[in-house]
Amino acid sequence: MERIVRKFCGKFWEDHIKNKNRKVSMKIYIDTNVYLDYLLERKNKYGKDLSRPAFEVFKRTVACEFNILVSNHLIQELRGIIELNDLTVLMSFLKKKIIMIPDEIKGKGDELHAQLAIKHGANLIVTRNISHFKKFSIQSNTPEEL
């Protein structure tokens, strides 16, 4: 995981220092698939890198552009797929920009993600599965569209 962070950071910390006084303009809820794109360095079926756009979302978050809503539902989905250490490193990287939200709503999968995002005031959901969120009253964007 640390190798992945170093791979993408480049001038990140220099940029972060320049932008640290910018006002946070949005609360976003990031779908599980975007975390997995980054953590597993995934590519699409055509070989396009999906990890870089996912990282850009996290980088912009740390640079004070966003706060990320994180639910226990999201954490449980991630823990079922990735190593706990990788998840811990990423969450530590983002910790000052994370807003933990309770899972007080019944539901499952993307429906629960959407309901939690709406209830806790997310401006949008960042996802690879735009079609899964069309029926909800919240905007969804891919990492590239953000």
Image (cartoon, helix red, strand yellow):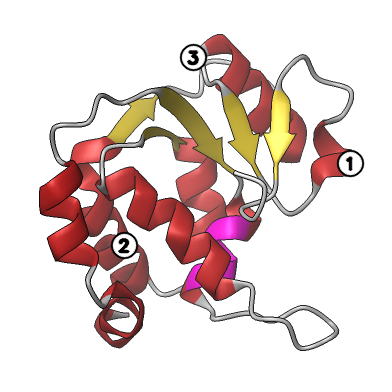
Give the CA distance from mark 1 to mark 3: 21 Å
Q: Say which label, 1 or 3, has the lower sequence index.
A: 3
The stretch in magenta equals 34-38
Type of amino acid under label 2: Leu
Q: Which residue is mark 2?
A: 90
Give the CA distance from mark 3 to mark 2: 22 Å
Q: Which residue is mark 1?
A: 131
Residue 72 percent location from the top left of the image: 45, 37
Quadrant for residue 61, please give it: top left
Q: In the rendered view, tell whether residue 5 sits above or below residue 103.
A: below
Quadrant (top left/top right/bottom left/bottom right) for the C terminus: top right
Type of amino acid under label 1: Ser
Residue 65 percent location from the top left of the image: 35, 36
Residue 22 vs residue 124: left or right?
left
Q: Main secondary structure of the magenta part?
A: helix
Mark 3, Cα crowd under 10 Å, few <14 / some 14-19 / many 20+, is some
Q: Say which label, 3 or 2, has the lower sequence index.
A: 2
Give the residue displayed 25% in from the left and 82% down from the top: 6
The residue tagged with tag 1: helix, strand or loop? Answer: helix
Give the residue displayed 61% in from the left and 27% down from the top: 124
Mark 1, Cα crowd under 10 Å, few <14 / some 14-19 / many 20+, is few
Residue 115 visible in image = yes
Type of amino acid under label 3: His
Residue 133 percent location from the top left of the image: 81, 32
Question: Is residue 52 located in the magenta-colored stretch of the structure?
Answer: no
Q: Are marks 1 and 3 in contact (CB under 8 Å)?
A: no
Q: Which residue is mark 3?
A: 120
The residue tagged with tag 2: helix, strand or loop? Answer: helix
Quadrant for residue 141, please give it: top right
